[in-house]
């Protein structure tokens, strides 16, 4: 691994002084190399921190599987939905300044959405089907915990076909105002607060932030989050001078064999989609995750209060919320959900070993991070492996990291 001229994101320390078993830690790299060798992964960057120190930093495979260039430690990745926790932090910063309230209706900030109605459960949601009035309005909390009644366009009922497929698709097709107009014409899938379903909630939240601050989301994040944390490579578009560090994916999905490609991260989106448009490095994201692990502070810079981080990373799904859709994802079965992060309810279930209170999220491109407060552990995995193989990699990593702890 070439680390010449590279500054570690956290102070390094010998892994055995941080409670890792050195021989078992080697299994992690061997397993990732095995995934590269069998054609399941183009390359990856893995960073593991414990007690605020960098215990492991490894690169594997290639930046571009079509070339011999090894993966650099500062490779850039489209992090997709790992954008969401950063946008939630930005919104919570505004809450702490008295400029935004979590339980306020979204229409207070985005009046374009004030007249939305709901698709009744007995209807397919096709254009022209009857709709019903809201029993209560969607709130800012609903946007962050995916209970607003919104969705992505990924389902069998007709209503899903009326929603854009992803944050990338929406922000490529429309600007922010046009996107809100499109949503306003659609019915919600269900009554706000009644069901968890993965959604455009954080994209809408990003536009709430823009309405409150008068700034583009990328500008606000750069000023208030990225620069204060020293996240120098995190942005919403890959700069021209850094294209040589932008990782590529395998040409074909290793499971289906179908042609595989990602949206070109060098092309600007029409709006800064808070649900999935950021680009970052493993080192930058480790600093963000470590800030959360520290209760809102890193290197003397406080972004959130300790209590607000506790609030964000606690389970927000009460018994009144149908959270059965969490079981559709193999690595979050049995989890609850906080504000833009999944929250582990107990050491059991979830398909992988971890601790109660662990929180995480991932990107559809193959990126992943988690924080285990009970173990003082922060893990960031960056890879461009967007197919279903990513669910296997998440479970594999959890098991390998857990077995390396003393």
Image (tube, grey):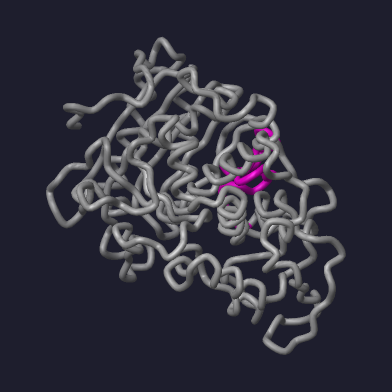
* Residue 239 is a magenta residue: no
Which residues make up the magenta segment? 328-351
Residue 208 appears in the figure: yes
Q: Is residue 381 above or below residue 321?
A: above
List the single residue furthest toward the front. Answer: 214
Q: Position of residue 331 (x, y in %)?
A: 56, 47
List the single residue furthest toward the left. Answer: 68
Which image quadrant for residue 264?
Answer: bottom left
Q: Position of residue 187 (x, y in %)?
A: 71, 75
Residue 356 appears in the figure: no
Residue at the spot 54% in from the left edge and 21% down from the top edge? 376
* Between 254 and 74, the one nearer to me in the picture: 74
Main SS, magenta region, reads loop
List the single residue furthest toward the bottom. Answer: 128
Q: Is residue 224 above or below residue 132?
A: above
Residue at the spot 40% in from the left edge and 57% down from the top edge? 386
* Between 278 and 41, the one nearer to me in the picture: 278
Q: Is residue 367 left or right of residue 91?
A: left
Residue at the spot 40% in from the left edge and 55% down from the top edge? 365
Q: Quadrant of the N terminus?
A: top left
* Between 93 and 400, the one nearer to me in the picture: 93
Q: Position of residue 63 (x, y in %)?
A: 22, 48
* Residue 338 is a magenta residue: yes
Q: Position of residue 67 (x, y in %)?
A: 13, 53
Which image quadrant for residue 45?
Answer: top left
* Between 334 and 160, the one nearer to me in the picture: 160
């Amino acid at each position: 691994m070439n680390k010449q001229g590279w500054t570690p994101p956290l102070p390094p320390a010998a892994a055995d002084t941080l409670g890792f078993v050195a021989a078992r830690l080697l299994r992690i790299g061997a397993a990732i190399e095995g995934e590269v060798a069998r054609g399941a992964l183009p390359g990856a960057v893995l960073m593991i921190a414990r007690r605020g120190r960098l215990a492991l930093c490894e690169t594997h495979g290639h930046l571009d599987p079509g070339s011999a260039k090894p993966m650099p430690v500062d490779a850039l990745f489209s992090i997709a939905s790992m954008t969401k926790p950063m946008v939630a932090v930005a919104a919570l910063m505004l809450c702490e300044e008295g400029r935004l309230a979590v339980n306020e209706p979204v229409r207070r900030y985005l009046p374009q959405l004030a007249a939305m109605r709901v698709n009744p459960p007995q209807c397919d949601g096709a254009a022209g089907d009857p709709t019903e009035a809201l029993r209560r309005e969607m709130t800012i909390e609903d946007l962050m915990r995916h209970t607003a009644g919104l969705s992505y366009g990924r389902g069998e009922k007709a209503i899903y076909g009326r929603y854009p497929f992803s944050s990338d698709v929406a922000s490529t097709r429309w600007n922010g105002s046009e996107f809100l107009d499109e949503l306003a014409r659609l019915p919600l899938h269900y009554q706000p607060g009644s069901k968890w379903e993965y959604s455009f909630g954080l994209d809408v939240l990003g536009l709430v932030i823009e309405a409150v601050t008068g700034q583009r989301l990328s500008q606000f994040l750069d000023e208030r989050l990225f620069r204060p944390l020293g996240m120098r490579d995190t942005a919403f578009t890959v700069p021209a001078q850094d294209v040589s560090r932008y990782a590529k994916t395998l040409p074909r999905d290793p499971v289906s064999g179908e042609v595989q490609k990602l949206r070109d991260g060098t092309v600007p989106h029409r709006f800064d989609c808070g649900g999935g448009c950021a680009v970052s490095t493993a080192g930058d994201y480790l600093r963000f995750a470590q800030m959360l692990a520290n209760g809102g502070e890193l290197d003397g810079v406080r972004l959130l209060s300790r209590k607000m981080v506790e609030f964000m990373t606690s389970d927000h799904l009460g018994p009144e919320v149908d959270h059965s859709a969490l079981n559709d994802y193999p690595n979050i079965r049995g989890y609850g959900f906080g504000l833009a992060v999944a929250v582990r309810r107990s050491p059991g279930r979830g398909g992988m070993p971890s601790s109660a209170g662990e929180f995480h999220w991932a990107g559809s491109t193959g990126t992943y991070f988690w924080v285990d407060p009970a173990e003082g552990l922060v893990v960031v995995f960056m890879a461009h492996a967007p197919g279903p193989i990513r669910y296997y990699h998440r479970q594999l990593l959890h098991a390998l990291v857990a077995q390396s702890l003393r």
